Amino acid sequence: MEAAASGPAAAVKRAPEQVIVHPLVLLSVVDHYNRVAKDTKKRVVGVLLGESYKGRIDATNSFAVPFEEDERDPSIWFLDHSYLENMFRMFKKVNARERIIGWYHTGPRLREADIDINELIGRYCDNPLLVICEVQPKEMGLPVHAYVAKEEIREDGTEKSKKVFANLPTEVGATEAEEIGVEHLLRDVKDAAVSTLASEVGDMVTGLRGLRSRLLEIREYLEAVLAGKLPVNHDIMRNLQDIFNLLPNLNVAELSRSFTVESNDMMLVLYLASLIRSITALHDLIDNKQSRQWHEKQKQAKEEAAKAEKEGGKKAAAGGEAAPAAEGGAAADGSEKKGEDGKQSAIVSRLRVIAFGAKAGALTELDRPAMLLQCGFLANEPAGGTEPNNSHELASAALVPVSTTVALSRPAAGGWGFALAAAGDRLYSWGVNSATLLAKAGANEDGVDPASLDEVTAGVSQAAAGFDHGLAVTAEGKVLVWGPAHRPASAAPGLLLSPVPFKVPITQVAAGEHHSLALSASGDVFAWGSNAEGQLGNGAAGGASAEPVAVAGPASGAADASVAAPVAAIAAGARHSVAVSSLGQCLAWGWSLHGQCGTGKAAPSVPAPTVVAALGPLKVVGAAAGMGHTIVCTDQGDAYAWGLNADGQLGDGTDLSSLEPKLVEDAALASETVTKVAAGSRHTLVLCASGRAFAFGWGAFGQLGSGQFASARRPQAVAVPGGSQVADLAAGWWHSLFLTR
């Protein structure tokens, strides 16, 4: 033992005067305590490593040492010498400059055996340092206290000299590299749900509590000195005098006035903010009431018109006989022609593609049924380029010329400024062509008007639009795909549809940036395309697959019952995928750098379907995925969103991203029941049972339908022409579609 002691011992000739504890020591002590003595009354003991220079000791590292002590008899304890010496040899190989400077324990206060343990550590270094780290501090202030043993001699000579611990000035310090590491660590553990203002207020409260505890200590000390319980310490008195000299004179009129003015300004801002919020909520309430009254009047008028028409028909039937046969034949021919024209007119009148833009003319026939509304970046100007800044940016209501004579429904908004909608079993497309995305022969000929995809001859039951490709499900359950990436270089001009090989009928499809999803009738999810971030859910990230692979549902073969349960709905984000199981659970996989997969942490990839456990018992009925965020709606009519929030796409009024689902709550949605959600690249849409639609997030192209090219961090109602109710909606990367009732 003596030989071992002479080796690692560091000769510290000068008595220590100041102690600097580095972050790595604090982290190591907390980890040691959590592993060995968490939720117990035991303490843990370890060795401190560091350097000493001119009375300043830097504790830069530490390691744990096996230690046991008898709770009933403090004089009985055990410390493993061999373990200590072996660990020090290994640490010395890593950093030869670090020496044993003392030891630590988690206290929380000094104990009887500490002097004996300190004597043992003294075999390895001169003037060993003792640092007590309070892992669970009960008082405000620095939870680190340093001591050094000194000889105490009674002046009267009544007792022998003995060693006692003397307190040393202690602080927590770090080098530049350590500060950077601590900042990254705090960034990872910081609660994204807590706002910056809340954090600042919490820090101020903590600081005031610490100040109060220090003032109480000063008062207790001075009272003890006055009562003769403690001797006068001139060093302490000098420090107290310096503290009082540094205090500002609060009796100065200018200082008091400055505090008052700043406080009044802050209170005025808070008052105005509360007033504006109340006025906005009242405005939404009145607007909702007026909309309900208007719909009630419309319904009553229709019922009265139907009643009057029925009574008029009865009177006409009882009025007289039919006209002569010859005249009747001429009348029949005329009626037939008139009937055809009337039928054609009725069909044409049902289609009203309303665009949100300032260039079109006045509104007409806003009360027609099944209007399809669009806003944001959709179709280029005839002489414009292919970038959004050269495009049709539509934000306010106006009619757009329509050349088709069909009633569009079931909208699907794509990424690269194009859209799809069905009319019966036919599929129509319009917007930016980008190398044959539309039903046009020209490779880059854009289309403002919807045009039929005549190549789809089997009838369309459902369609989806990705960033630069489209998907269609035929009435027979087959899947067709088209777009630049699915078009051979040798292909002839015109639209080219390629079949996707499936052995089972498909009922639903979803399209992401460069990957696709399909849902079978039996509840199995298939994926194909890019897998750079694991968005195909096959357990690994990287590469791509031209053939569909099963990722969730009974055919996936997953051991997890949640993943193997039949899937009811699917959604594809830019590079991540979402599914809703028949159990009401939400599954997500793929890119999750902003936490959009809902695992509770940011990760470059989540390669396999994972249940969003933070939703708990909530039953999810619908989901949507954007570029970096996800939103779902539950059977209770609530919406929850998580992930990227740089543009307010989570609707919580902030730009702070969230790693876990957050309830989308706002005064505008207080009385609403959410039935459907949709997500663009950086904006979000929600549809309510009342027929109202709300939008929030990025709105630079007018995709929020508010009449402005501006973003919104809270839900705002979409201004539907004529107050019509919305029956369906879809969100593209830079545009939105709304189908009215």
Image: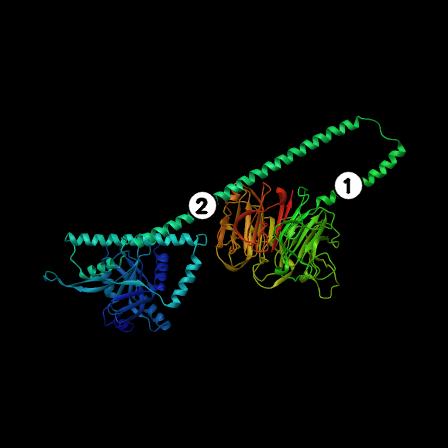
Answer with left or right where residue 91 lies relative to residue 496: left
Q: Are marks 2 and 1 in contact (CB under 8 Å)?
A: no
Q: Residue 144: which quarter of the image?
A: bottom left
- 318 is higher (above) or lower (below) than 419: above
Q: Secondary structure at mark 2?
A: helix
Q: Say which amino acid is labelled 1.
A: Gly
Q: Who's the residue at 33% across and 69% down the image?
A: 88
Q: To which quarter of the image does residue 231 belong?
A: bottom left
- Per the image, the residue denoted by label 2 is 274
Q: Nearer the viewer, residue 423 or 134?
A: 423
Distance (Cα) linking label 2 and label 1: 55 Å
What type is the residue that disc 2 sits on?
Ser
- Label 2 neighbour load within 10 Å: few <14, some 14-19, many 20+: few
Label 1 residue SS: helix
Q: Nearer the viewer, residue 62 or 21?
A: 21
Name the mark on residue 342. Answer: 1
Query: Is residue 611 at least partly visible in the picture?
Result: no
Which residue, as the protein is rendered here, is positioned at the far right? 326
Q: Is residue 494 visible?
A: yes
Asked whether 696 or 349 is in front, the reply is 349
Q: Earlier in the sequence, mark 2 or mark 1?
A: 2
